[in-house]
Image (cartoon, helix red, strand yellow):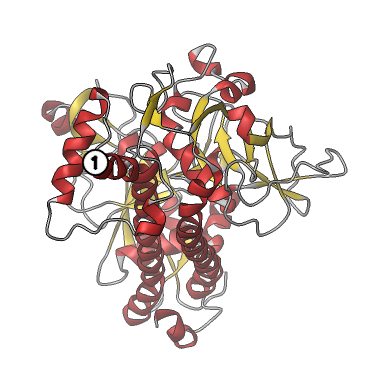
């Protein structure tokens, strides 16, 4: 670490540690902060327990965390840190410390970024004590750790640049949530609630089963609204105007489905339904491997993937394709989460805890199939077999699940709109990936002083 603007932690912040025991935990009350709540510079309070107000008084005699403190782990999860948020009543948990910045010397946000920077993380690694059971850093030595702290004005400019990234990332994420809601609402209206078929049945005066009476009432109220916009005739006329009973109560509405639609097994509408590989991991090169952590909120986050060494585990013919639906297949709380592959930036496979479900596009258009799978997600989550810790999703059971499939031309009516929404979402994900890479490249260089803040003005545009 160069000499420019280098100070010791003890020169710009006070160091405190938490209790060395664990109080009785309850369901509500002040937070007892856990080091597991510290992740990627964020504080996830859902991973912290609660204590009583009486316990809180005892466990904050040494220090009470307050807004702007930098929370950190000094045992096991070394290097993790986050800012203490405003308006949260909490005490430090075991193995957790905090830095209380001298705000005339260092901004809390800048201190967090500096703590998370590669330079400081390397210093933590060099000065880690390797015990018999846990790794730790000495709180007595921490005030002597060196850290680069420039002028307050430069800190403020760095923080402004770095904060711009979360804002842009969040905007894109919010747009994607809206796009997904639009896709799900459209699919639900046409292929789960059967609105076009009900409209046609009402217009034709055809009988509608009693089991659909509640949907009829909802539809009539919608049609009475001044801003109601009926489907164009060329779309509505492709839908039937009658219903028929399938005898399968889990399909349609109590077994009633539009006339001419087919009840099929998932295996009948797919080309492939298989688990992934058992990877031989490597740190460099190799082939990208998607794991269960990558699949969340109906998106595939390639940033959380790992790499397989193809010389030790061949992957030929196992690559995923656009349109595949990836289904998490192991573990309570994880099993059943799914996402459709809308982009493949490089050759990619999945590991053995993920099932690849590839639609047959001659039966189910791929984006229609993606929404069909999303509509089945909750029921898929209930299909796990085995003990709590070893719950597995059987390929056989997944393939046996019944789905309702309209004639191909009816499914294609929605395909273009779903593809357009998916393409927009993919573009935002691609932009977020590029922004995250730029952020991760820029942050250490700003903190180390390798690049000047003036060179980054375009990042705030």
Residue shown at 40% from the left, 75% from the top: 161
Q: Position of residue 388 (x, y in %)?
A: 48, 15
Q: Position of residue 385 (x, y in %)?
A: 53, 14
Which quadrant holds residue 209?
top left
Which quadrant holds residue 67?
bottom left
Residue 204 or residue 223, whichever sits in front? 204
Crowd around label 1: few <14 · some 14–19 · many ≥20 (10 Å): some
- Which quarter of the figure is the N terminus placed in? bottom right
Q: Is residue 87 above or below residue 191?
A: below
Residue shown at 31% from the left, 37% from the top: 46
Could you tell whether 373 is left or right of 306 in the image? left
Q: Is residue 403 above or below residue 284?
A: above
Q: Pick out the residue farthest to the bottom.
A: 454
Residue 390 or residue 430, whichever sits in front? 430
Q: Position of residue 315 (x, y in %)?
A: 80, 42
Q: Position of residue 212 (x, y in %)?
A: 26, 29
> In this figure, which residue is indicated by the disc labeled 1?
202
Residue shown at 45% from the left, 48% from the top: 80
- Which quarter of the figure is the C terminus placed in? bottom left
Could you tell whether 232 is left or right of 104 in the image? right
Could you tell whether 401 is left or right of 30 in the image? right
- Tally of marks: 1
Residue 414 or residue 155, whichever sits in front? 414
Q: Is residue 356 above or below residue 105?
A: above
Residue 460 makes an appearance in the image: yes
Find numbered disc 1 in the image and state the secondary structure of the residue it sits on.
Answer: helix
Q: Pick out the residue farthest to the top.
A: 387
């Amino acid at each position: 670490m160069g000499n420019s603007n280098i100070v010791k932690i003890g020169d710009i912040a006070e160091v405190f540690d938490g209790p060395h025991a664990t109080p009785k935990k309850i369901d509500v009350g002040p937070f007892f902060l856990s080091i597991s709540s510290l992740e990627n510079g964020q504080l996830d309070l859902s991973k912290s327990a609660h204590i009583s107000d009486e316990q809180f008084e005892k466990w904050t005699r040494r220090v009470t965390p307050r807004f702007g403190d930098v929370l950190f782990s000094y045992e096991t999860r070394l290097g993790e840190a986050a800012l203490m948020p405003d308006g949260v009543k909490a005490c430090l948990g075991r193995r957790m410390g905090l830095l209380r910045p001298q705000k005339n010397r260092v901004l809390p946000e800048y201190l967090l970024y500096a703590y998370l920077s590669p330079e400081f993380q390397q210093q933590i690694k060099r000065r880690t004590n390797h015990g018999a059971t846990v790794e730790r850093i000495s709180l007595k030595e921490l005030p002597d750790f060196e850290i680069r702290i420039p002028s307050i004005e430069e800190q403020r400019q760095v923080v402004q640049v770095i904060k711009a990234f979360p804002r842009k990332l969040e905007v894109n994420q919010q747009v994607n949530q809206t796009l997904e809601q639009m896709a799900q609402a459209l699919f639900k209206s046409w292929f789960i609630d059967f609105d076009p078929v009900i409209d046609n049945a009402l217009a034709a005066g055809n009988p509608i089963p009693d089991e659909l009476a509640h949907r009829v009432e909802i539809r009539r109220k919608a049609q009475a609204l001044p801003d109601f916009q009926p489907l164009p005739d060329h779309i509505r006329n492709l839908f039937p105007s009658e219903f028929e009973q399938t005898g399968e109560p889990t399909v349609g509405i109590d077994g009633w489905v539009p006339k001419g639609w087919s009840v099929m097994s998932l295996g009948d509408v797919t080309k492939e339904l298989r688990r992934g590989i058992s990877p031989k991991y490597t740190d460099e090169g190799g082939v990208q491997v998607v794991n269960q952590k990558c699949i969340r909120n109906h998106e595939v986050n390639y940033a959380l993937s790992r790499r397989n060494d193809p010389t030790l585990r061949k992957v030929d013919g196992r690559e995923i394709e656009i349109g595949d639906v990836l289904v998490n297949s192991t573990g309570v709380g994880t099993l059943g989460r799914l996402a459709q592959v809308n982009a493949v930036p490089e050759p990619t496979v999945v590991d053995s805890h993920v099932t690849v479900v590839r639609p047959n596009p001659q039966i189910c258009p791929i984006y229609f199939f993606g929404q069909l799978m999303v509509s089945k997600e909750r029921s898929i989550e209930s299909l796990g077999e085995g003990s709590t810790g070893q719950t597995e999703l059987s390929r056989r059971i997944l393939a046996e699940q019944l789905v309702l499939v309209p004639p191909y031309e009816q499914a294609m009516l929605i395909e273009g709109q779903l593809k357009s929404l998916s393409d927009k979402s993919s573009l935002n994900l691609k932009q977020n990936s590029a922004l995250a890479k730029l952020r991760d490249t820029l942050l250490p260089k700003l903190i180390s002083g390798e690049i000047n803040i003036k060179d980054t003005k375009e990042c705030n545009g």
